Image (cartoon, rainbow, N blue to C red):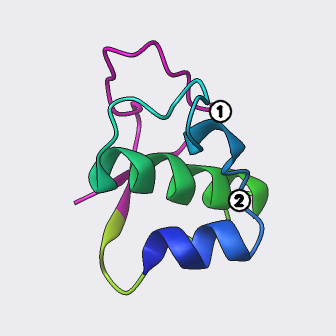
């Protein structure tokens, strides 16, 4: 649900589409991490834009990925619990 919401309301989810630079690892958690981070960044890091019904929190460091995926950065990145 969080991926659908984030991608449908302003997140740039192109990198997590098949053959995108952040498609691998192809897991719901990794794709959700990217989608909610993009949503949060595009909403200007506004408090409350990172809750996703309690399934996301802000973090100072992006999730690590062996695929080489680079998350957009700013002072507060998002990670799914």
Instruction: Specify the quadrant that holds the N terminus.
Output: bottom left
Q: Is residue 74 visible?
A: yes
Which percent across, then down, holds residue 17? 59, 44
Number of numbered discs visible in the structure rendering = 2
Q: Which residues fall within the magenta stretch?
A: 57-81
Query: Which residue is painted at 66% across and 51% down in the image?
Result: 13
Mark 2 element type = loop
Q: Which mark is residue 72?
A: 1
Q: Which residue is mark 2?
A: 11
Which percent across, then down, holds residue 12? 73, 51
Query: Which residue is painted at 37% across and 87% down in the image?
Result: 53
- Rendered position, 38 above or below 68: below
Q: Is residue 48 visible?
A: no
Q: Are marks 2 and 1 in contact (CB under 8 Å)?
A: no
Mark 2–mark 1 distance (CA, rounded to whole Å): 11 Å
Which percent across, then down, holds residue 61? 39, 30
């Amino acid at each position: 649900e969080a991926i659908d919401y984030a991608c449908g309301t302003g997140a740039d989810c192109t990198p997590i589409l098949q053959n995108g630079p952040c498609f691998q690892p192809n897991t719901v958690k990794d794709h959700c991490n990217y989608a909610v981070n993009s949503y949060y960044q595009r909403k200007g890091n506004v408090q409350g834009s990172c809750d996703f019904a309690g399934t996301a929190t802000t973090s100072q460091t992006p999730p690590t990925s062996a695929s080489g995926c680079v998350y957009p950065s700013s002072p507060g990145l998002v990670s799914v619990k």
